[in-house]
């Protein structure tokens, strides 16, 4: 048999990513590709200069131009990625130009539109209809039918909802009123999601793009390999840790699967992990990256803006559940390795984590500065701009430092550059912008420097392309938000959830969870969070669930949707790499990600798990004591559940031990009277039974 078919069966990481994200392909070749490349470069440049306030424009104009850029790039890039015929490519370019025209109209008519707000002209209506049509088609092209159909249902409800039976009906709205509400102002397409996309999200995507090109993925992988590769089940632990660290700079779980998974899944299989389990571990860890601060798949910024709370408050609520999630995944792979008696990697084949840090320590600095600024009360816009500027300075400065003749000069150079970077605290962005201009000028006259500048240029263009699906999703979910504000549609669902919750809070939580899982099967995490938080969030809040906990609840289950059958997008992305059915991988992923399904419920009944006030224990003993108790209980429940699912602790577990351990975990998770006491007793029984039997198994083996 020839090698050609075998090669075709093993697509590269880029090819796998393109199967799930057509825009992951590079810019097309030829004049068309160069034009789109430079247009994407202009897009990124516009976002940076407006974020840094080099160009001050009204927020409405920035949002409109942002959407115009998105539409102008999406249509021709999708036509090129799908290798469409020439007529379709021509139509795509025309559609892109119409997207630009809508942005220009919003900019030119900005003042006039404000004056005639609520009384649109015929031209306004035509422009609004064109914008909405383009947005629906662009979303369908990029993400498939699910999100545009859902948004279309909401738009249809605005137009025809008065004909529905009570209590679903509304008073009725004129066509011009609906279009004016959706396509102009800040309640529809240009609402909070687009505002966040045009300011915070875009900058953080660029930030991640620069760090990836500078070698951050290699740094994360080397550290994970060096720290955990030689341990029992080391390859799977590397997958969990590397994917968790990738989540700090990446906002796409599927992208994590096909980048880190391309390395970790074959490694896990080579050392004895089952194909389905290896794929499930990578899918679980990669999706978990979206709940790992500081970026959190960009949802953290939307959540902070929607709730009007500091970003630090969102991270504070997310950090303990995120750590528990990854500890759970780490524990599951540890137990699976023990059950299958899987060893780690040879120590002499592993990279040194200290050497990796020594060589690339400077890449961590922008991330540290970013986190410090965010927790110091600075806006995400300012923190993201500074973090991006520092990353560019490090990349450009590193190119210059390599060309210096001695180590002394390099040290002096880095100290000087560090002082200049630190001066932004006194002089603001002017200091950083001036330093970048000087570094660019120096690099222009160096051969290696010109290659570095080309790398930065490419990062800007690639970052803009990466931002397209997120930006389009944020724009179209504005229609759903606009429907809520215009018709009050959320009240109907909310009243139903509240009615159920008065009888059983648990049932209302299950109903909300199922809504998130169903919606999340076809749409990305960001629009899923926006939709479900708008619909279900107010209802849970009325039932007494703290505000941040409510939003975290729907956010978590939006992420879990990518691991849940039948769609399980992250699992099907891992399937070609693992050479296993996506459904089999999904089943294993649910087992590994058990904490992701459990923690939100525990947090509702004990908000201290998310470091939020609320619950009887926090009221009686204080938040600190309540947090310590609930974290301990969660760790014990996760530990017992993992042992019950895998069937291994110190030695293989008997059926009775697994049954008692599972019962203990379930009762510890519940928040009913006496369930904690019963759970602790069952946990003690399960551990005692297993310890006693393990001695009888291990002692004879030792003697023999």
Image (spheres, grey):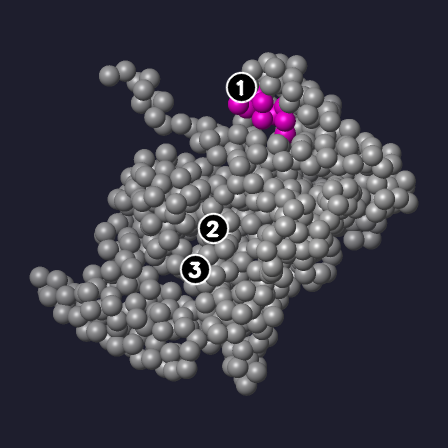
**Dot 3: element:** helix
Return the residue nearer the eye: 444 or 514.
514
Residue bounds of the magenta highlight: 74-83
Q: Residue at coordinates 58% horizontally, 63% vertically from top-left?
A: 494
* Drawn side of residue 664 relative to residue 156, left or right: left
Number of residues whose C-alpha sits closer than 10 Å to that of mark 2, classed few (under 14), some (14–19) or many (20 or more): some
Total marks placed: 3
Say which residue label 2 marks. Answer: 518
Q: Main secondary structure of the magenta part?
A: helix
Instruction: Examine the image and state in which quarter residue 96 appears.
Output: top right
- Cα separation, mark 3 vs mark 2, equals 15 Å
Kindly check if marks 1 and 2 are in contact, taking CB atoms under 8 A apart as contact: no
Residue 256 percent location from the top left of the image: 48, 42
Q: Residue at coordinates 57% horizontally, 31% vertically from top-left?
A: 141
Q: On screen, 703 above or below 577?
A: below
Magenta span contains residue 155 = no
- Mark 3 or mark 2, earlier in chain: 2
Q: In which quarter of the image is the N terminus?
A: top left
Q: On screen, 695 above or below 150?
A: below
Instruction: Examine the image and state in which quarter residue 390 appears.
Output: top right
Return the residue nearer the eye: 268 or 311.
311
**Dot 2: element:** helix
Say which residue label 3 marks. Answer: 597
Q: Quadrant of the C terminus?
A: bottom left
Residue 664 percent location from the top left of the image: 32, 72
Say which residue label 1 marks. Answer: 83
- Mark 1 or mark 3, earlier in chain: 1
Q: Residue at coordinates 31% horizontally, 38% vertically from top-left?
A: 580
């Amino acid at each position: 048999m020839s090698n050609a078919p075998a090669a075709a069966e093993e697509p590269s990481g880029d090819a796998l990513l393109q199967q799930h994200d057509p825009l992951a392909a590079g810019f097309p070749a030829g004049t068309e590709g160069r034009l789109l490349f430079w247009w994407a470069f202009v897009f990124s440049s516009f976002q940076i200069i407006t974020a840094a306030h080099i160009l001050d424009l009204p927020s409405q104009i920035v949002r409109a131009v942002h959407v115009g850029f998105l539409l102008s790039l999406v249509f021709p890039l999708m036509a090129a990625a799908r290798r469409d015929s020439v007529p379709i490519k021509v139509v795509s370019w025309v559609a892109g130009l119409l997207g630009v025209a809508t942005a220009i109209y919003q900019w030119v008519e900005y003042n006039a539109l404000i004056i005639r707000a609520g009384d649109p002209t015929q031209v306004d209506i035509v422009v609004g209809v064109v914008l909405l049509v383009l947005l629906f088609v662009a979303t369908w092209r990029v993400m498939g039918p699910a999100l545009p159909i859902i948004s279309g249902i909401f738009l249809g409800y605005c137009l025809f909802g008065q004909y529905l039976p009570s209590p679903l009906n509304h008073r009725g709205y004129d066509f011009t009123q609906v279009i004016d509400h959706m396509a102009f102002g800040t309640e529809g397409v240009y609402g909070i999601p687009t505002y966040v996309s045009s300011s915070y999200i875009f900058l953080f995507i660029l930030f991640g793009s620069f760090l990836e090109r500078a070698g951050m993925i290699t740094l994360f992988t080397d550290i994970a390999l060096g720290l955990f590769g030689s341990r029992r089940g080391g390859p799977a632990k590397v997958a969990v840790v590397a994917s968790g660290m990738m989540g700090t700079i990446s906002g796409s779980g599927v992208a994590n699967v096909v980048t880190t998974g391309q390395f970790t899944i074959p490694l896990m299989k080579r050392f004895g992990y089952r194909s389905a389990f290896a794929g499930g571990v990578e899918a679980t860890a990669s999706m978990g990256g979206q709940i790992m601060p500081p970026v959190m798949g960009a949802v953290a910024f939307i959540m902070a803006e929607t709730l009007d709370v500091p970003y630090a408050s969102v991270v504070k609520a997310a950090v303990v559940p995120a750590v528990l999630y990854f500890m759970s995944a780490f524990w599951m792979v540890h137990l699976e390795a023990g059950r299958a008696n899987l060893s780690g990697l040879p120590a002499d084949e592993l990279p040194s984590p200290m050497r990796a840090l020594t060589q690339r320590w400077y890449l961590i600095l922008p991330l540290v500065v970013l986190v410090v600024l965010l927790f110091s009360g600075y806006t995400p816009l300012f923190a993201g701009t500074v973090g991006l500027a520092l990353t560019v300075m490090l990349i450009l400065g590193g190119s210059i430092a390599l060309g210096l003749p001695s180590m002394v000069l390099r040290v002096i150079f880095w100290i000087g550059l560090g002082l200049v970077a630190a001066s932004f605290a006194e002089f603001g962005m002017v200091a950083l912008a001036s330093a970048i201009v000087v570094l660019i000028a120096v690099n222009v006259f160096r051969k290696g420097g010109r290659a570095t500048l080309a790398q930065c240029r490419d990062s800007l263009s690639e970052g803009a392309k990466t931002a397209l699906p997120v930006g389009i999703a944020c724009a179209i979910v504005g229609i759903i938000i606009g429907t809520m504000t215009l018709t009050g549609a959320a009240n109907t669902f909310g009243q139903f959830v509240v009615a159920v919750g008065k009888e059983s809070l648990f049932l209302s939580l299950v109903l909300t969870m199922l809504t998130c899982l169903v919606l999340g099967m076809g749409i990305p995490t960001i629009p899923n969070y926006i939709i479900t938080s708008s619909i279900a969030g107010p209802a849970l809040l009325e039932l007494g669930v703290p505000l941040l906990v409510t939003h975290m609840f729907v956010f978590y289950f939006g992420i879990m949707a990518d691991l849940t059958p039948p769609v399980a997008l992250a699992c099907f992305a891992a399937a070609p790499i693992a050479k296993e059915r996506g459904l089999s991988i999904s089943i294993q992923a649910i087992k590994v990600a058990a904490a992701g399904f459990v923690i939100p419920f525990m947090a509702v009944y004990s908000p201290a798990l998310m470091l939020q006030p609320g619950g009887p224990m926090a009221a009686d003993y204080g938040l600190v004591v309540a947090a310590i108790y609930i974290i301990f209980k969660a760790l014990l429940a996760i530990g017992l559940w993992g042992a019950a699912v895998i069937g291994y602790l110190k030695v293989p577990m008997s059926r009775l031990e697994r049954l008692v351990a599972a019962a203990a975990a379930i009762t510890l998770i519940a928040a009913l009277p006496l369930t904690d006491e019963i759970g602790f007793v069952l946990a003690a029984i399960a551990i005692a039974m297993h310890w006693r039997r393990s001695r009888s198994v291990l002692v004879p083996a030792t003697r023999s």
